[in-house]
Image (cartoon, helix red, strand yellow):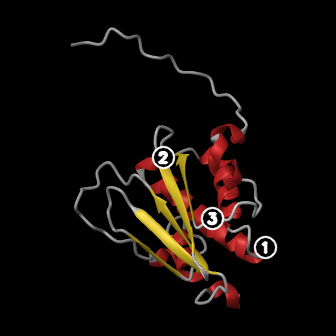
Amino acid sequence: MPSSLTPVAPLPEVTVPLNRFIPTGHRHYFNGTWDTPYNRRRFDFWGMPELMPLVRAFLDTCAASRDPEYRYLFTLLGSELANNALQHSDSGTSEDTYTLVAERSLDGIKLTCRDNGMADGYRGVREYLRIDPAGFDTGSETGRGLVLLDAFATDWGDSGWVSHRHVWFYLAYDLRDSAWSIA
């Protein structure tokens, strides 16, 4: 049966303050201070690259109790996961989302990025991420993110599910097993 509804005409773009994307009960997730202790924080982001400053504010606030160097590295690695979700999954469409989950432990923070995978990804099929040797080339356009993650995170991995990937990294507070500590 054909629809009798008229399609919505393309709407103009507008500038909206980023804080309008934050629900009232979650504002402390983005304020950059250590006001509210937590063990676990989770936030769903729209698949829009324009929201990356909001992502970085979330990541920086998750590590707010740590020194500036740790905060910088945690934010850098977390931003890389978010950018990968935008670039390499269906989460990168403005109608879709990805989720960042930060879990604090006594000696570090684990960040998981849950994206919506690829539409052509088969459910039940696992394909784990692996380092692309081309990523070591400074002129390369692909693969550098996982090289960065592998070098600077204490540990990292992924679920292997192509249809709904969960990529995570763990960064120890003392930066053990991270090339950052010797760089």
First-in-chain label (3 vs 1): 3
Asked whether the residues under the numbered discs 3 and 1 touch, taking CB atoms below 8 Å apart as contact, a structural biologist would say no
User: Which type of secondary structure does the marked residue at label 1 adopt?
Assistant: helix
Residue drawn at x 52%, y 73% as measured from the top left = 169
Residue drawn at x 58%, y 64% as measured from the top left = 80
Of the residues shown, which amino acid type is indicated by label 2? Thr
Closer to the camera: disc 3 or disc 1? 3
Q: Which mark is residue 17?
A: none
Q: Which mark is residue 97?
A: 2
Q: Nearer the viewer, residue 58 or 142?
A: 58
Residue drawn at x 62%, y 23% as measured from the top left = 12
Name the side, left or right, on which 94 lies relative to 181.
Answer: left
Residue drawn at x 68%, y 28% as measured from the top left = 14
Q: Position of residue 177 (x, y in %)?
A: 58, 89
Residue that label 1 marks:
68
Residue that label 3 marks:
38
Q: Position of residue 98 (x, y in %)?
A: 48, 51
Q: Residues within 10 Å of mark 3 (few under 14, many from 20)?
A: few
Asked whether the residues under the numbered discs 3 and 2 touch, taking CB atoms below 8 Å apart as contact, a structural biologist would say no
Q: Is residue 183 above or below residue 101?
A: below
Q: Hey, which quadrant is residue 22 in on the image?
A: top right
Of the residues shown, which amino acid type is indicated by label 3? Tyr
First-in-chain label (1 vs 2): 1
User: Which type of secondary structure does the marked residue at label 3 adopt?
Assistant: loop
* Residue 80 in view (yes/no): yes
First-in-chain label (3 vs 2): 3
Q: Is residue 57 above or below residue 105?
A: above
Q: Residues within 10 Å of mark 1 (few under 14, many from 20)?
A: few
What separation in Å lies between label 3 and label 2 (alpha carbons)? Answer: 23 Å
What separation in Å lies between label 3 and label 1 (alpha carbons)? Answer: 19 Å
